[in-house]
Amino acid sequence: MGAQIRVYKRRIKSVTATKKITKAMEMIAASRIIKAQRQVEASTPYASELTRAVTAVATGSNTRHPLTTEAESPVRAAILLVTSDRGLAGGYSSNAIKTAEALRERLTAEGKEVVQYVVGRKGVAYYTFRERKLADTWTGFSDSPTYADAKAVAGPVIDAVLRDTAEGGADELHIVFTEFVSMMTQTPVDRRLLPLSLDEKAGEPREQGAKAEILPLYDFEPSAEDVLDALLPRYVESRVFNALLQSAASEHAARRRAMKSATDNAEELIKSLTRLANAARQADITQEISEIVGGAGALADANAGSD
């Protein structure tokens, strides 16, 4: 019985050590969520004004630009998937991958060839294990992206849309990322970035009955084409940057939730093991008392027989 108690004590010690680790990871993730939220909020004004400027150029001129013009018969679509570099975040990466796979099936059903771009080691590992070809990958910054990282990601995908499909280019660009709704809710979404849809050209969705925003009139120097050439890449970069920030906040929230669940489970397991150890100790004590009582009774019987 003593050996069983030692086993319980070793397990309690091991689970307690694991609990300390998960608790620390939970606290770290919680602190990083606040920073990620602030970054998302800080990037919003720039993205809003840039969207407004692109809207003014796209709607105020009759310029046809490769990034704003729909292909008559699109044959190839690019998907940019944002996942995490590390695990221990519950279903964060797997949910994003499922959304990307559903988008891939939908585009394939439309007769389009899919070109895959992936951010994060989890997504890269998923496609590498299944021996699927990836056009480009980026890793090492999923939990704390910078604008330089967004530019590095946006550059190749913009080039793909600008290239002719006969040269390996793409007619469309879609992005799959996890939208941060709240500390408890993170939703994987897919959005089409290029070419700009009519809704995107019109700006943010308006409530029913609301008046459309009257955009100011601009004179474009040297030309509307040159302005679009300068603005559209910045627009895509800002959208990619926002998606990376949203995904980073979602990753930290998912990790905090997963680590809290692990910590709670560790506490329950410690309580359960403690009860089992106490029961084993009580059984050991009861057995010792029974042996003592039995020995005393046998000795008393022996003494009575000798008399």
Image: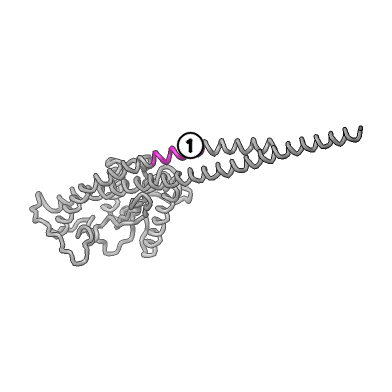
Q: Residue furthest right?
A: 306
Q: Which secondary structure dominates the residues rendered in magenta? A: helix
Would you say residue 293 is visible in this rendering? yes
Q: Above or below — where is 287 with respect to 76?
A: above
Residue where numbered disc 1 is placed? 20
Q: State how the image is colored.
A: one colour
Q: Position of residue 157 (x, y in %)?
A: 30, 49
* In the image: residue 246, left or right of residue 297: left
Q: Decide which of 24, 267 is in the foreground and name it.
A: 267
User: Which image quadrant is residue 143 in?
Assistant: top left
Magenta span of residues: 18-29
Which residue is rendered at x = 42% and y = 56% of the image? 98
The quarter holding residue 299 reads top right
Amino acid type, residue under disc 1 in the picture: Lys
Q: Is residue 286 magenta?
A: no
Q: Residue at x 40, y 47 (%)?
A: 254
Q: Position of residue 181 (x, y in %)?
A: 33, 53
- Residue 165 visible (yes or no): no
Q: Position of residue 69 (x, y in %)?
A: 22, 59
